[in-house]
Image (tube, rainbow, N blue to C red):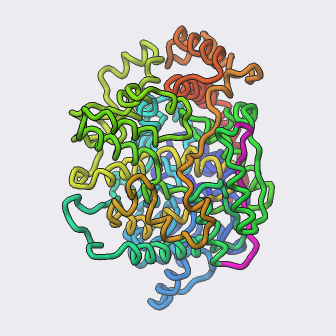
Amino acid sequence: MCGIAGYIGTPATAVPKATLLDRMVGAIAHRGPDACATRVFDGAGLGHARLSIIDLAGGAQPMASEDQAIWLTFNGEIFNHIELRQELEEKGHRFRTSSDTEVILHLYREKGLDCVDDLNGDFSFAIWDEPKQRLMIARDRMGVRPLFYTQHNGCLYFASEVKALLQVPGINAELDPVALDQIFTLWFPLAPRTAFTNVSELPPGHVLTATADGMRVRRYWQFDYPDADGEGSFAGRSEASLAEELRALLFDATRIRLRSDVPVGAYLSGGLDSSIITAAVKQITPEALRTFSVAFESAEFDEREQQQEMVAALQTQHEELLCTQTDIADAFPSVIRHTETPVLRTAPAPLFGLSGLVRMAGFKVVLTGEGADEVFAGYDIFKEAKLRRFCASQPDSRFRPLLYRRLYPYLPQLQNQSQASLAAFFSAGGNALDDPLYSHLPRFRTTSGTKLFFSERMRRELGDYDALADLRDSLPGDFKRWHPLSQSQYLEAAHLLPGYILSSQGDRMSMAHSVEGRYPFLDHRLVEFAARIPPQMKLRALREKHILRESVKDILPKTISNRPKQPYRAPDSQCFTSADAPAYVDERLSRSALEAAGYFDAGAVEKLLAKCRKRPTVGTRDNMAMVGIVSTQLWHHAFAENADAERSSAEPRAVA
């Protein structure tokens, strides 16, 4: 894992090209503290901040082909690099290093732009092809590793994080109002849009090529599910045989993600998914395993009992981070500087602290269970949509709405609602059954309530913009032919996963402390296999991740393998409204600061702040709104107000 940056074209700035590249790399040096280097060409430039994990001595970058014609800067890991190396050697390729970086160079020589098809990994990289005068940048299928780009004065710039792009004179931070509307509706900006006006992200599974003649973006991979009315490729297969194949794929995905020249640890939350990965590691290797987890003071969020049960069962060497509300509030400004986007939950903050603990323990790599809920239908939203359809088929039934109490058992406010209130909350209206977003409409409706705090200026700029219409328009052509569960899974896996979970809670929090997260459940072979599994094997009645549980039930304690989903959550608005909240809350939410930024109605925010300070708990809308407003104001302060400070913080480094 590393940080990359570069450009194609001729930067229209008085800053020397090498110095500019050096500043861009310096801005993301936290992603690669082991070495920084740049390379300037006639018409292009590449930079790299290295976190050394594979071939510590020989993997320096930017790396060139033997004849110096092809150059590469690369962030991430290619987990099947050993197998690819063997295939390439059989075709006559000769290697100078044992790095996965060099494998990409040779594979590009062999297959050109199609080299991405053979890669099993989490990556973003840039290749400068000197003879063709062509830049290629690519991003992994699931969107684990970030990659951003922008065009300015005829030059295309790219980087792992936006803060590197802000080192270019003339590129300034301005919040995109449409992106903010999307975040306050969907939780994420719809790719390629980002929180920054005129800055795009390369979507997952895409390749961008640029020459003097222009730029082209193409998709090389996408999610695909069987038609709902078809038998699918697994017709006739028994559940037992599919579970056996699933297990083999999962174990292999875990095995190749243990490839490293530095020690590998694991996150162990106490939930099913991280427990599966940890147990799989113990099955694969006899070596002692270090595990790490977050604990909370409040029993509502804490999972220490389950964590300790798995630690005892697997005999791991375990460390935990006790995270308080004060810890979350104190870390939040740094968290937002790393997410580079407003968020509606504080959940990234404890993970920011956890990666710091991992780094202090001497680890650069951890395996996590992220992705299982999206791939194997683990979230309550999937059960919710199934129940809503079931209730809608007999809308006059007095008994069917009682089933809603089986949803979200960890939310006491919801459980205390009357039967009529539950039915009203979960109902999205009978006319919405054929809406492609049906499964997520209650969530989007609740989240959209946070936009009540938008300022008049924001409302004018947005006009009649509709984020849900934008999302509907982005759906693939085959979407309506898929099973409703597959549709729900797509919305989670193709959008929320890369747009929020893998970014704000994943890469950005781990790499803030130079720690690489690896995700066996997101191996594309496993993702493609799971997409073809019949929906009833993933969600059996209301038992989530049924076939996954069956495939690994012999390696977990029964209390863990049968435990209902307990999503990772953290204290939210109370972190900023308690008596010992940090001073920046009053500063950033002062009337003058709110009016200067212009995103929110100062009077409405004052009332919200008073309400949250008066009550220990508030409703979901107000909870999200408070976090969203605080994070947006922190974003504005870090990037829009302090652009010069952001540039000066990227101190020049030695240029290679």
Q: Residue at x 32, y 40 (%)?
A: 388
Q: Nearer the viewer, residue 25 or 493?
A: 493
On screen, 104 above or below 76? below
Q: Residue at x 73, y 60 (%)?
A: 34
Give coordinates of residue 199: x percent, y percent: 46, 39
Left or right: 628 in relation to 647? left
Give coordinates of residue 267: x percent, y percent: 66, 58
On screen, 378 above or below 528? above
Given the current orientation, which residue lies at the most extreme front position?
399
Snapshot quadrant of residue 234: bottom left
Residue 40 visible:
no
Give coordinates of residue 185: x percent, y percent: 41, 31
Q: Is 629 a magenta residue?
A: no
The stretch in magenta equals 285-298
Left or right: 649 in relation to 3? right
Give coordinates of residue 553: x percent, y percent: 55, 69
Q: Nearer the viewer, residue 171 or 441?
A: 441
Q: Nearer the viewer, residue 621 or 186?
A: 621
